[in-house]
Image: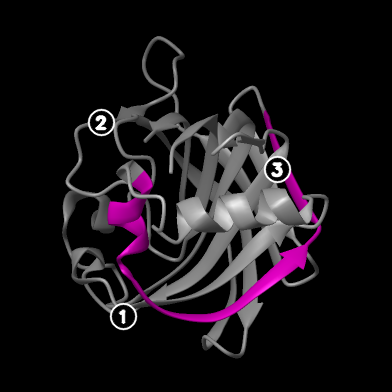
């Protein structure tokens, strides 16, 4: 099984800025409620073209992120074909190995796998993520002294292994999933953006 995926990441959680999980520290609240979405701009999995689709995980992290045991709901873009959905799930559940598998093994329980309309936009460093009716976030980056996006790299944890991420905040973050015990409606907490290339 092989894959090559190029795309973008939008991530938001209820930690304050900057989320300590990325440097291996415990989350600000003792636990972390997050949405992680990967937009595949182009790529294929075992010959199946998957570009133009988004896959996302809504997750509760019960403690230090490196210890795993996350509880998650997985959402696949409702515009994906069945073959594309199957291919993406193979990668993002770790079955296809490679850099994504190390991340996938941190999930202990998957409460659901669903198709949903997903809006994923990034323009000028600002982003919007919407999954169905229960999840919505707006994201904006922090800027450095020269106007470039503030970058975090070489971290002990990453949802885009091998890629730097742009540090930001979420002016709006709403997430509700009773199966996971998530009910979040907060402002100006942690957000991250990135681009990635995954090969296996």
Q: Residue at x 46, y 40 (%)?
A: 168
Which one is in front in this view, the residue at disc 1 or the one at disc 3?
Answer: 3
Which of the image's four quarters has the C terminus? top left
Q: Quadrant of residue 197?
A: top left
Residue 3 left/right relative to 20? right
The disc placed on residue 153 is 2
- Establish if 162 lies above or below 114: above
Q: Position of residue 98 (x, y in %)?
A: 32, 43
Q: Quadrant of residue 15?
A: bottom left
Residue at label 3? 53
Counting residues from the start of the chain, the first of labels 1 and 3 encountered is 3
Marks 2 and 3 in Cβ contact (< 8 Å): no
Way the structure is coloured: one colour
Which one is in front in this view, the residue at disc 2 or the one at disc 3?
Answer: 3
Say if the magenta span includes residue 120. yes
Q: Position of residue 8 (x, y in %)?
A: 55, 34
Q: Residues within 10 Å of mark 3 (few under 14, many from 20)?
A: many
Q: Residue at x 73, y 35 (%)?
A: 52
Which of the image's four quarters has the N terminus? top left
Say if the magenta span includes residue 25. no
- Establish if 158 lies above or below 30: above
Element type where label 3 sits in the image: strand
């Amino acid at each position: 099984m092989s894959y090559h995926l190029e795309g973008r990441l939008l991530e938001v959680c209820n930690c304050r800025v900057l989320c300590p999980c990325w440097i291996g520290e415990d989350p600000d609240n003792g636990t972390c409620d997050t949405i992680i979405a990967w937009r595949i701009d182009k790529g294929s999995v075992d010959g199946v073209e998957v570009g133009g689709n988004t896959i996302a995980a809504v997750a509760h992290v019960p403690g230090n992120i490196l210890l795993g045991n996350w509880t998650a709901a997985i959402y696949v873009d409702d515009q994906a074909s069945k073959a594309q959905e199957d291919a993406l799930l193979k990668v993002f559940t770790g079955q296809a190995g490679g850099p994504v598998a190390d991340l996938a093994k941190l999930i202990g329980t998957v409460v659901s796998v669903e198709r949903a309309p997903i809006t994923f936009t990034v323009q000028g460093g600002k982003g919007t993520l919407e999954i169905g009716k229960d999840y919505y976030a707006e994201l904006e980056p922090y800027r450095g002294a020269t106007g470039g996006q503030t970058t975090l790299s070489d971290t002990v944890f990453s949802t885009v292994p091998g890629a730097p991420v742009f540090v930001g905040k979420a002016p709006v973050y709403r997430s509700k999933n009773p199966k996971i015990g998530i009910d979040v409606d907060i402002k100006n907490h942690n957000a991250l953006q990135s681009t990635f290339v995954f090969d296996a």
